[in-house]
Structure formats: structure tokens, C-alpha cells
Amino acid sequence: MNDTFDGLDAFAAGLTSAFRSQRALHLIGLGAERIIQKRTREGISSEGSTFRPYSPAYARVRQREGLPTDRVNLQRSLYDGMLSKLDHVVAADLSAVDVLINDPRKAQIARYHTVPGEGRVYRPFLALAPNEEQQVMGLADELLQSELDALLSIRR
């Protein structure tokens, strides 16, 4: 077989691998997690608005626990709260990454806030705003460029 074609085959295989990199997908998932956590802790919804205030009854519970009530940030505990259970999963075929809450009880609380319904306080947070999607896409571009640079340096 022709050495040029063998090299192109290897390059094409490397290029395909760069697009389906488990490491890159994990980093993208981690980036999305951090964006959601940071924005939510600042009291901003995925739609760009500030969260509705806590109900008076829940605000009193938070006050008794020594937690702030002036800004709704959906964080009751640093280590066992809903936001600390934010995680990501990479599809087995490396085609996608999904951000989720990996604790069933905390996921139920998240559904309460993110699915509109009667008697619920709608506080959407478990999504990326368009500008945040751009941040994640920028990270993906950087990771892909890094993979391509490494691949091209092997070719030289």
C-alpha cells in the first residue's frame, strides 16, 4: 500500500478520534456544570432573570438555619445541596454529554423548580443560556484545536 495513503488513513482515524474524545467530552460536561453552578449561586436563572424570592415560610426556615435569604441561589448546603450533586454523563458511543443531578432526592427538588406547574415556584436553572452555550462551544473549539494540533505534530 502507498505510504501517503497509509498516513492519510492514520490522520483520518486521528481526526475522527479527536471529534469523539472521551476526555474532551468530560471537560465540556465539567465546563457546563461549572457555568450552571456559578450562575445559579449568583441567583440568576438560565433565562437571565433573578429568581423569585423564597416563600416567607421557607425564608424563616433558612434564617433559623443561619442561611441567607436575601438572594435566592438554590443552595442549602455546600456539600449536600442540589448544586453539589450536579454531574455529567458521557454517552457510551461518545456522541453526547448530558448534565444532570445524580441524586434522586435532589433531582426531585430540581424538577420542582424547573418544571412549571400549579403551586410550584418556577426557577429554571438546569440549562444553558445562549451565551453560556457559546462559552461551552468555545471550550469545545479549544479542545478540538488542541487535539488537532497534537495530531498535526505527529504527522510532521
Image: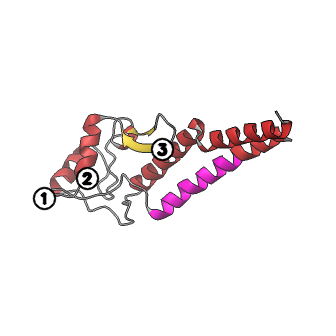
Residue 106 in the image, given as x and y percentages of width and height: 28, 39
88 vs 74: above or below = above
| Contact flag, marks 1 and 2 (Cβ < 8 Å) | no
The percent coordinates of residue 107 (x first, y second) are 28, 41
Amino acid type of the residue that numbered disc 3 sits on in the rendered structure: Ala
Q: Which residue is mark 1?
A: 118
Element under label 3?
loop
Q: Residue 128 at what x, y percent from top left?
A: 43, 56
Question: What number is the disc on residue 96?
Answer: 3
Q: Looking at the rendering, in which quadrant would you find the N terminus?
A: top right
Q: Depth check: give the residue in front, 99 or 49.
A: 99
**Disc with the residue nearer the chain's start (1 vs 2):** 2
Q: Which quadrant does the C terminus fall into?
A: top right
Q: Residue at x 54, y 60 (%)?
A: 134
Looking at the image, what colour scheme do you see? Answer: secondary structure
Q: Secondary structure at mark 1?
A: loop
What range is drawn magenta here? 130-146
Q: CA distance from mark 1 to mark 3?
A: 33 Å
Q: CA distance from mark 1 to mark 2?
A: 12 Å
Q: Residues within 10 Å of mark 3 (few under 14, many from 20)?
A: some
Q: Secondary structure at mark 2?
A: helix
Q: Image quarter for residue 88?
A: top left
- Disc 3 versus disc 2: distance between alpha carbons? 25 Å
